[in-house]
Amino acid sequence: MRRLWTRSGVSVYVALAAFVVVASCNSSDAGKAERGRAVSAAAKAPPTQMPDEDTPAPEKTGGFDGKRAFADVAKQVDFGPHPAGSQAIAQVQDYILSELSSAGCATDVDAFTAQTPAGEVAMKNILAKIPGERPGIILLATHYDTKRLENFVGADDGGSSTAVMLEVARNLCGQHGRYQVWIAFLDGEEAVNPEWKDPDNRYGSRQMAAKLNMSGDLKNVRAFILADIVGSRELRIKRDANSDKALTDIVWSTANRLGYFGVFVNMPTAIEDDHQSFSARGVKTVDIIDLEIPYWHTPQDTLDKISSKSLAVVGHVILDSVKQLQLQNK
Ligand SMILES: [Zn+2]
């Protein structure tokens, strides 16, 4: 995915500047106090490869288990870098399918071949389907492929949102609402080339949108909720200008009501991501994403960056937003 407005890239430079200040303080006598503070802060920091101690219990987050979602991120990271077409991604696909099957979800797998700048790449979209009383569909989505970069495991970019959707599936499969809920695990979101340039990106979502259009299901999709990069410790999700305003309002007012106004903030951004494969075909979409992470598309996107609390917040908001959408009559 890509952010269109670069103005807020300032935050990255602020973080870098802060790092330089701390580093230079540490190299001088005058920095002793600073150093002492840094050491005590480090001592208080949570263990970096474990879920947060103070992760809310599932009863507090609508049944969503943040610690279990954290374990799902850890599992994906353990498979190593898993770009589309790799051997490792086959293991991630098996993992997703086996977790969905344990949760009692019915699934469809669409194996397809994408034409990319690196030639033909085999890809797989996985779709969990929860039945409803009416033909309308609430479609949730994540991508699970990682960017083709050396030593890039994508704990946050790919891992976090996939973990959230697995835990959402555990909560929803077996339920039966007014509308169907489908949960898409998309392959091939990342560009094969280093830079993001259409059509070298969003292979999986384009494929799924086209396929659902052919089958006639697309017209029944009432809402498309995408999550992507939702696991950071200082999660701050801005309203995406490329998302549907009314659907964004539903998600943000849900987050407000649940007390998460510090995470779902009322600031604008503009994101290119998988939701656009659906909005281009007239579907109402929303992207839940924090793209302003200093470790984006670097080998530092690792498990220690992930907060089980952040996963729980996003999972809670998605589960409750689905509840709101289930209450709609038309
Ligand atoms: Zn990415």
Image (cartoon, helix red, strand yellow):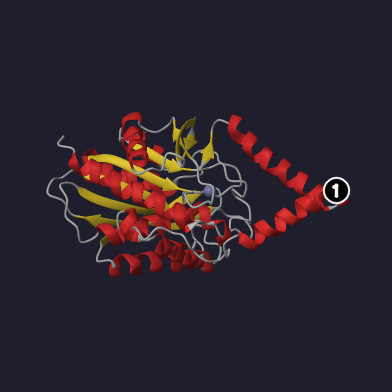
Percent x, y for residue 129?
24, 56
Q: How many marks?
A: 1
Ligand 1 under 8 Å from disc 1 Cβ: no
Query: Closest to the observer: 167 or 192?
Result: 167
* Picture residue at 12% right of the left edge, 49% below the top: 133
Residue 22 lies, with reference to residue 280, above or below; the image says below
**Viewer can see residue 108:** no
**In this rendering, does residue 60 appear at all?**
yes
Judging by the rendered image, the residue that carries numbered circle 1 is 30
Residue type at the position of mark 1: Ala
Quarter of image, res 14: top right
User: Is the C terminus in the top left, top right, bottom left or bottom right quadrant?
Assistant: top left
> At numbered mark 1, what does the secondary structure look like: helix, strand or loop?
helix
Which residue occupies the extreme left position in the image?
133
CA neighbours of label 1 inside 10 A, class few (<14), some (14 to 19), many (20+): few
Q: Splitting the image into 4 quarters, where does residue 328 fall?
A: top left
Residue located 44% across and 34% down the image: 239
* Residue 137: percent from left, percent from top: 22, 45
Asked whether 67 or 210 is in front, the reply is 67
The reply, left or right, for residue 228 in relation to residue 29 is: left
- Residue 152 point in image, percent of width and height: 60, 58
| Residue found at x 33% / y 47% | 318
Where residue 160 appears, as percent x and y from the top left, is: 46, 55
Vertical placement of residue 30 versus 8, above or below: below
